[in-house]
Amino acid sequence: MTPEAPGHAGGDALHFSVLTLFPELLRPFTQEALLGRAAANGLLKFDLHDLREHAGNRWRKVDDTPYGGGAGMVIRVDVVERALAALPSTPDEVILLTPAGQRFDQRLAEELAGRQHIALLCGRYEGFDARVEGLVTREVSIGDYVMMGGEAAAACIMEAVGRLRPGVIGDEESWRADSYSSGLLDYPEYTRPAEWQGHGVPQVLMGGNHAAITRWRRDRALERTLARRPDLLPGAGLTPEDSSALLTLGVDADALAGHGAPPPPTPKRKRTRRPKTPQEPV
Ligand code: ADE
């Protein structure tokens, strides 16, 4: 049996409907590389909808000045309502992309991979009329910075969610070992040349001892996560062996619990063998 992405029940293509003022910005994401191949193979489905088609006026104007005054323009809620109503099926998730939303992360990607039809609503200008809140299931931000629109955020979500559907990435197992799916950052990888500008490849990777390689990779993932994202350690399901590795990496024994690490394995007591009684010659 092939492993399934968490939260995904299998079956039909995952359908993304993107509502945007710039559908052509996203076209390459849906046609090239692995997402494009998944769409061609019927694993994912992408529909790009131009919000201007639903402007309701011959100037295709979708925005207006904000009540109360101020700079910028606001996208009208009735335009969004018509665009959503025109979708061929009702999405089970309607996401407004905004820097004011819930932060997107791997856990949310895994949750969304279980949906059948996700609508992504991309803003531009000053944003949407606040009443769109009543039309969406959630608001999502891809990080604490402000972009000029939600299209790049929609692309991030399609990439991160799409790759969790079975068959989308070649190696079904590879998403499990990835940064975040394992709870830790990725371990470093190397390939030829074995020697490059004075930099070699760690000897253990050249040796073919698979148990040693697995442990080395786990230790490097722990080392990287400790150095770069220690906040991830408590959620990473650390084992007693990981705790030993953390101690070797310089973590104080008292600090292990704070990183969500269990006590390290108790060293096995050496069995003291009773000296053999010399056989009496008979
Ligand atoms: N639109 C503009 N900035 C954004 C962000 N950080 N996340 C999602 N949508 C956005």
Image (cartoon, rainbow, N blue to C red):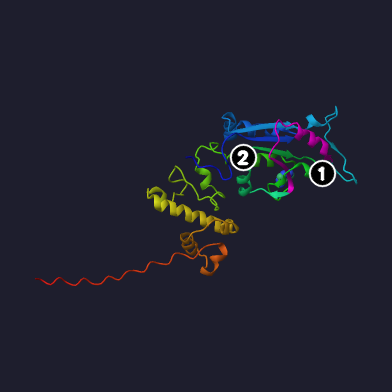
SS at circle 1:
helix
> Is 234 in front, or is 70?
234
Magenta stretch: give its range: 73-100
Q: Is mark 2 within 8 Å of ligand 1?
A: no
SS at circle 2:
helix
- Residue type, numbered disc 1: Arg
Q: Residues within 10 Å of mark 2 (few under 14, many from 20)?
A: some
Q: Is residue 80 magenta?
A: yes
Q: Tell me, for residue 159, which label it has, or none.
A: 2
Residue that protrudes farthest toward the top in the picture: 58
Q: For residue 73, what is the image quadrant?
A: top right
Q: Is residue 6 left or right of residue 64?
A: left
Q: Tell me, for residue 131, which label it has, or none.
A: 1
- Residue type, numbered disc 2: Glu
Front label number (1 vs 2): 1
The quadrant of the picture showing ligand 1 is top right
Is residue 203 in sight in this rendering?
Answer: no
Q: Position of residue 108 (x, y in %)?
A: 64, 47
Q: Is residue 269 left or right of residue 4?
A: left
Q: Residue placed at 70% from the left, 39% from the top?
A: 120
> Is 48 in front, or is 78?
78
